[in-house]
Each structure stands twice: as C-alpha cells, then as structure tokens.
Amino acid sequence: MIKVVLKVVMAAFYVFSGINHFRSPEFYLNLMPAYLPAHEAAVIWSGVAEIALGLLLLWPRRQWLAAWGIIAMLIAFLPVHVHMLVNSHLYPETPVMFLWLRFPMQAVLVAWAHWYTRVAVRATSAT
C-alpha cells in the first residue's frame, strides 16, 4: 500500500513540476547552461516529458517504462545541476549548500523511480 501511495506522490510531483514549466518558463530558462542549444524548446519538452512520465507512472502495465523514462530524465538534468553549482554566482538567491544537496537528492529520486521499474506479477490460481 505504501508503494502505491508513494507512486501517486511521485506522479503528482512530476505532473506539477511539468505544468510549472509552462506557468513559469522564465525560471527554467534562467537555469539553462549557455552551451545547451534551444533553451525554449528544452524547457517545453522537459515539461511535456515530466507530465507524460508522471501520468504514465499511474498506468500499472507501463509504470516500468515511466520509471525508466524518469531515471533517464533525471540523468539528463545533471548538466544543469553541475552548471548551477559551478556558476553559483549566477544564482545568488540559491544557497550553495542547496546546490550541493541536489546531487544526493537526485540519487534518491533515481532510486525511488527505480523501485517502479519492475511490474508486480500476481499469482494466478489454476481453477
């Protein structure tokens, strides 16, 4: 039961995060490293991906696909976290300790998503 509740929490987290890409795109644009191309497209598509993966996580037969997609997405976001830490002077409103803590938090989020990469198979009785 806890696993199901936490899956709904995770799904809601990604759906709301994805929606926020459209509500406050300037926030995400500000985080984008200059060396990454197509900032606006990246913000839009990452928002779409977060919403889609969050919703897909709620589909039991496809939760494994959503979980692997979330893991890939979290890994893809790592360059942004590194950029923010290396260029912390560009983000004076964000404490440097918070920027460091994002890395272990990413590991927790990856582990959490990995928990849903296997679909439980129910035993069927031959009657």
Image (spheres, grey):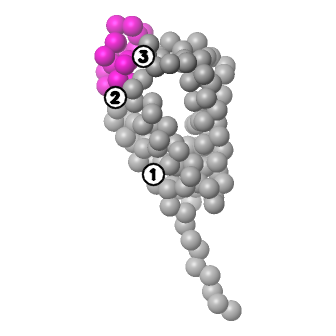
Which residue is labeled 1 in the image? 114
Q: Earlier in the sequence, mark 2 or mark 3?
A: 3
Q: CA distance from mark 1 to mark 3?
A: 30 Å
- Quarter-of-image position of residue 100: top left
Task: Say left or right for 103 vs 127.
Answer: left
Identify residue type, mark 2: Leu
Instruction: Tell me if I can see residue 22 in this picture.
Output: yes
Viewer-side residue, 38 vs 82: 38
Taking the magenta stretch, the answer to whether it contains residue 93 is yes
Taking the magenta stretch, the answer to whether it contains residue 115 is no
- Quarter-of-image position of residue 91: top left
Task: Say left or right for 81 vs 9.
Answer: left
Relative to 44, residue 122 above or below: below
Relative to 10, residue 26 above or below: above
- Location of the C terminus by quadrant is bottom right
Identify residue type, mark 1: His
Q: At 46% across and 43% down in the image, what residue appears?
A: 71
Where in the figure is residue 86, as x and y percent of width and height?
Answer: 31, 16
Relative to 112, residue 28 above or below: above
Where in the figure is residue 54, as x and y percent of width and height?
Answer: 61, 42
Where are the magenta residues, as a range?
81-102
Which residue is labeled 3 in the image? 35
Q: Which mark is residue 101?
A: 2
Viewer-side residue, 37 vs 112: 37
